[in-house]
Amino acid sequence: MKTSDFYYDLPQELIAQTPIPQRDASRLMTLDRATGKTEHRHFYELPDFLHPGDCLILNDSRVLPARLLGQRLPGGGACEVLLLTDRGEGTWECLVRPGRKMRPGAMLSFGNGELTAEVTGEIKGGNRLVHFTYQGIFLEVLERLGKMPLPPYIKAELQDRERYQTVYSRHNGSAAAPTAGLHFTPELLAAIAAKGVEIGYVTLHVGLGTFRPVKEEDITDHTMHSEYCILSQETAALINRTRAAGGRCVCVGTTSCRTLESWAGEDGRMEARSGWTDIYIYPGYRFKVTDALVTNFHLPESTLIMLVSAFAGQEHVLAAYQKAVREKYRFFSFGDAMFIASGIDENAEKPENPEKSTVSGDNR
């Protein structure tokens, strides 16, 4: 298949620049992966589509405030460093700007010298190795000095950095949020659990490679980025128990899906694992364990829209995206969501108030 097969036309004004006031008031498009039928609902209605005996799998990675703005020494020229991967002993792989003035040996200062650094190496692709010097705990220094590394298509300043974190985030390490989870509130999670749906967690630290466009004409020529992920014994046992009893494994986000599909056996059985994954899912892939998917709307020609197309069918997905554009859904990280599963028409609860399911625009 060609990369252009996953293109759709998106007006710039539909790219959400800020989060809405209430997380779970986002709109929710349902897509039946078997029939292609869609329906317009709201995210707070997600429990209507979950069944007792299902399990809901969430990615609990937490975004690092990994964007550092400082000065080059001794001249004082401005610099920007974006932390990507912890290489240990105070050294991180980073993106830097301006690259031509950030060669090995360059000295940097952040927060009036509270944090200093030296560029110690340059690696393939242009990233730099940067060694940091500080007093105390590095993550606490980052909390004081760092900014959220928002995606390049978001130009607005984020007023509350917790809105780029899920309410259940626990483990620091991501360079971008697992955005399908941004819609959940503690109250919604409690309602889901009360329905008899067990909740499990995986950890996948999202890398900036998630925003890297596919430049090759043939999608199979694309080299997928690697990300570190963890599947605990507790979550593996939950998934095995759920599916053995006939329940569904509902993944929240492509990151949860990629984690499970990376470590699932050919028979769908899960075992605790951790490590780097570069799994690349596109149409033709056979899903081993993912039965339903909660996801945001993704960039045209991205590996994420390819994954969703593998799950629900390219024609169904692109038709749904075209409907979302016509109905003026909000797109990408701070945008609206989709719930994708088979048999939605037969199994979903209908809203008591029909007006509740219309495209009301109450969250715009």
Image (spheres, rainbow, N blue to C red):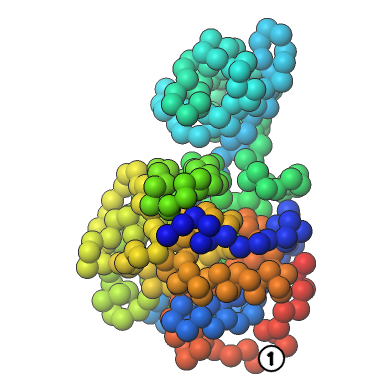
- Up/down of 65 relative to 202, above or below: above
- Up/down of 96 relative to 174, above or below: above
- Up/down of 155 relative to 92, above or below: below
Query: Can you give x and y, in whole percent of width and height, for residue 40 in the image?
Result: 64, 80
Query: Can you give x and y, in whole percent of width and height, for residue 363 in the image?
Result: 75, 69
Q: Which residue lies at the image location 62% right of the left edge and 15% below the top edge?
A: 101
Q: Count the labels in the image.
A: 1
Query: In which quadrant will I find the N terminus?
Result: bottom left
Q: Which residue lies at the image location 50% right of the left edge and 73% below the top edge?
A: 315
Classed neighbour count for the residue bearing mark 1: other residues with Cα under 10 Å, few (<14), some (14–19), many (≥20):
few
Q: Which residue lies under the disc numbered 1?
A: 354
State left or right for residue 18 relative to residue 269: right
Judge by depth and name the residue closer to the eye, 245 or 350: 350
State left or right for residue 332 relative to residue 252: right
Q: Which residue lies at the image location 76% right of the left edge and 78% below the top edge?
A: 360
Judge by depth and name the residue closer to the eye, 225 or 150: 225
State left or right for residue 156 relative to residue 82: right
Can residue 268 be seen in the rendering of this structure? yes
Q: Quadrant of residue 199?
A: bottom left
Query: Can you give x and y, in whole percent of width and height, for residue 149 in the image?
Result: 62, 40
Can residue 55 be seen in the rendering of this structure? no
Judge by depth and name the residue closer to the eye, 30 or 316: 316
State left or right for residue 150 relative to residue 246: right
Query: In which quadrant will I find the C terminus?
Result: bottom right
Q: Amino acid at mark 1?
A: Pro
Residue positioned most to the top: 74
Mark 1: which secondary structure? helix
